[in-house]
Amino acid sequence: MKKLLLIYSMWMLTLSAAFAQQTGGSNLLDVTVGEHEDGSTPTDSLTTDSLAADTLALDTIAEPVALPWPQNVQARLDAILKSRQFQTTQIALQVYDLTADSVIYQYNERQQMRPASTMKMINAVTSLDRLGGSYQFKTRLYYTGKVDSCVLRGNLYCKGGMDPAFNVDDLNAFVESVKKLGVDTIRGNIYADLSMKDTDRWGEGWCWDDDNPSLSPLLVGKKDRFMSRFVKELRDARIVFIGDTLRATTPAGAIELCARFHTMDQILMRMMKNSDNLYAESMFYQLAALGNRKATAKTGREHVNRLIQKLGLNPGNYYIADGSGLSLYNYVSAELEVAFLRYAYRNNNIYTPLLTSMPIAGVDGTLENRMRTGFARGNVKAKTGTVTGVSALAGYLTAANGHRLCFSIINQGQRKATTVRPYQDRICEALCK
């Protein structure tokens, strides 16, 4: 009898343990990344963004059997959002099925939050819509006066178009054009024409201690040193310069000597893949200058707001402070970002260059070291965003059933982006598999 009771007791204990495992007696998803199950925090060196650890926890939880689309995805996302991480931080999320033309998941989708560098996606969509894919970022050199016995008795004008890719090779082309004019001496001034935009060199709401780009229309090698470098290159080419470097608007009668440009694709690729802030601000100020207006953040914002209104949303609910996402004054929502992604998807002239420019999970750009394994690798193409207290991800992927999806995830309120990026990666994996 005692033997029978012992066997029965062991059988009950085994059953109880199995039941606890199936019903989530220990919910692995509720362990915050960077924490042990007992709540203690490991050193920062142990906190990683690797998806391997994340998907291990995710896959140990049994999913409901044979749920149809999109309920299967909804169940996965519900489970992820139960993490304790989101008890102390904010998350906004919207997922849109482009194939079925319907929202399949949303959470705090209208919450106003800072986009960080996903603002570049909004900027890119608006710029491709308004400027077009063939747009060129130009810097021009003009001259006035006459050339007499190899002496230019007149002035040079460097007209800035805020081309962020203008480099030393382009500057050398300016010097060569002066030499081809038959000039070895300049008796006049060299003027910087900065009339394209206002005099603000920083964006609204930028932090003073960030590595901020200079918002000058005339840059060389991304630095605000155009005039000094131009004079140096002229002298290195044995062209004597007798005059001053000043600022002025190019006069109407000036003759164009040289024009250098970079294409929309060239600027867009670096802006999105590398999240280059200068390239993004340059794009934003091209928008702002449309219609031969003096470019300001306000005139750039007007173009974005018009598109927001076209999408059926109220521009008054958001604030567009810059084109890069550096500003802490930017406020958008996951719903707004998804609306921009949907609009791009419906317009091939926007969608093709936009998709090509986006970082690819586990492959390149700012997503090269994220989602390096699993179904998301090579599938997710999205713009990342990070400023202090904010981490975001917005882009496209293809679900296992072949449906094309777009999504926006914005996390806010965490001290370190590394604590929430793995959850963004899990969401993408859940949508892909």
Image: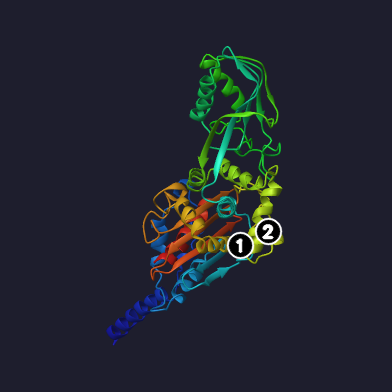
Q: Which residue is tagged 1?
A: 336
Q: Residue at x 41, y 63 (%)?
A: 57
Frontmost residue, 291 versus 85: 291
Frontmost residue, 409 versus 40: 409
Q: Which residue is tagged 2?
A: 318
Q: Position of residue 231 (x, y in %)?
A: 58, 20
Query: Does any portion of residue 416 appear in the rendered image?
Result: no
Q: Is residue 5 above or below residue 418?
A: below
Kindly check if marks 2 and 1 are in contact, taking CB atoms under 8 A apart as contact.
Answer: yes
Q: Residue at x 41, y 74 (%)?
A: 63
Looking at the rendering, which quadrant does residue 160 occupy? top right
Q: Position of residue 191 (x, y in %)?
A: 66, 25
Looking at the rendering, which quadrant does residue 211 occupy? top right
Q: Is residue 108 above or below residue 182?
A: below
- Horizontal side of 49 relative to 280 (left or right) equals left
Q: Amino acid at mark 2?
A: Tyr
Q: How many marks?
A: 2
Q: Secondary structure at mark 2?
A: loop
Q: Residue furthest top?
A: 149
Q: Which of pointers 2 and 1 lies earlier in the amino acid sequence?
A: 2
Query: Does any portion of residue 146 appear in the rendered image?
Result: yes
Mark 2 vs mark 1, CA separation in Å: 9 Å
